Amino acid sequence: MDRVDGRSLLEEEIYSQPEVVARLLERETAHAGQIVCQLPDFEYIQIAARGTSDYAATYATYALASLAGYPVSLATPSLHTIYHAPPRLRGALVVGISQSGQSPDIVAVVEEGRRQGRPTLAITNDGSSPLAAAADHVIELHAGPERSVAATKTYTAQLAVLALLAATWNGDSQKLAALQGMPEAIAKTLAGAGATVSQRAERYRYMRQCVVIGRGYNYATAFELALKLKELDYVMSTAYSSADFRHGPIATVEEDLPVILVMPAGAVLEDMLGMAKDLRERGAELIAISDAEEARPLARTLLPLAAPSPEWLSPITAILPGQLLALHLALAKGLDPDTPRGLQKVTRTY
């Protein structure tokens, strides 16, 4: 395992996120404003993405709809590359999100948007990638090379770009100011959660399966955390919204089943507290990612959010204890967090 100052590459990248998001906001805030002004009229946003980027797109379905008022749909790239039956994109702004910008199916969706005369936008860490070349406008993540296979800093950077676009379209200067404060919030969250998570991870060393639950803005966080537990720890982790979990999957809860609840303060907290109480009654072992005092007595393990954020921005910090949990769980299992088995940094799907 490669190490920087005694840390794995993954840990180094996790702890680089305050600087990454600060650099992104410094370099792209004005640019995002220019793009928003230059875009022609559109009625909805269609986003193409895969893997971690797809969960950033899931966040966009909440942030762009609630702050900017635009409906957001997630593209089905196989319609373009396998079935060769792309849908009509009349009225759409077509957005491709990809860390590498290399995946042919994501590029194909953006190329089809341009072919149909629709405005297109690429969000990528590589401004010279095929995705960037296919789009009318490009917002770069400025995250630097991501040497560890599992994406961390590019995910939070993607969330920050989408939050930036949402706040820019919204036009509320207070929302833009709140976003500018996120690098400090990220740093405080990492500092507050680091020691706690490293101490608690050993308890879950033999965990083979778990459930991850979030709702609203943090529906995306649940899926991204479940992916990190699969990638780094080989845990069969399944993500749900609290609403969907009640519609059947709750019947699978058995004594001592680990359930991770992403439940920062906000509009969905009461629903998540009710979910936590129901799960406790069924004997589940609860791990809560939260800044709410009400979560403390319900959770067997509390992973703290030391810097409360507005709910619409909370996914940027709420994923951080999850990243640390996946990292320290891998170390407790004797796994190399930088090179998960069977994975590679750039995945090309068609």
Image (cartoon, grey):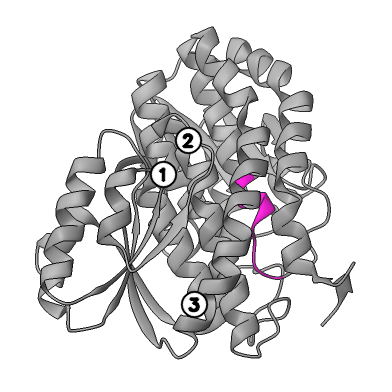
**SS category of the residue bearing label 3:** helix
In front here: 154 or 313? 313
Q: Which callout, 3 or 2, points at the residue further toward the start of the chain?
A: 3
Q: Where 74 falls versus 337 (above or below)?
A: above
- Assign the C terminus to one quadrant of the image: bottom right
Q: From which residue to which does the magenta span run? A: 149-156
Count neighbours of disc 1 (C-alpha within 10 A) and say few if under 14, some if 14 to 19, many if 20 or more: many
The answer to whether residue 256 is magenta is no
Dot label at residue 291 = 1
Dot label at residue 230 = 3
Image location (x, y in percent) of residue 30: 72, 16
Residue under the image location 54 percent in, 81 percent down: 233
Dot label at residue 308 = 2
Image quadrant of residue 179?
top right
Image location (x, y in percent) of residue 209: 36, 83
**SS category of the residue bearing label 2:** loop
Marks 1/2: CA distance? 6 Å
Asked whether the residues under the numbered discs 1 and 2 touch, taking CB atoms below 8 Å apart as contact, a structural biologist would say yes
Image location (x, y in percent) of residue 196: 55, 63
Quick check: can you spot residue 111? no
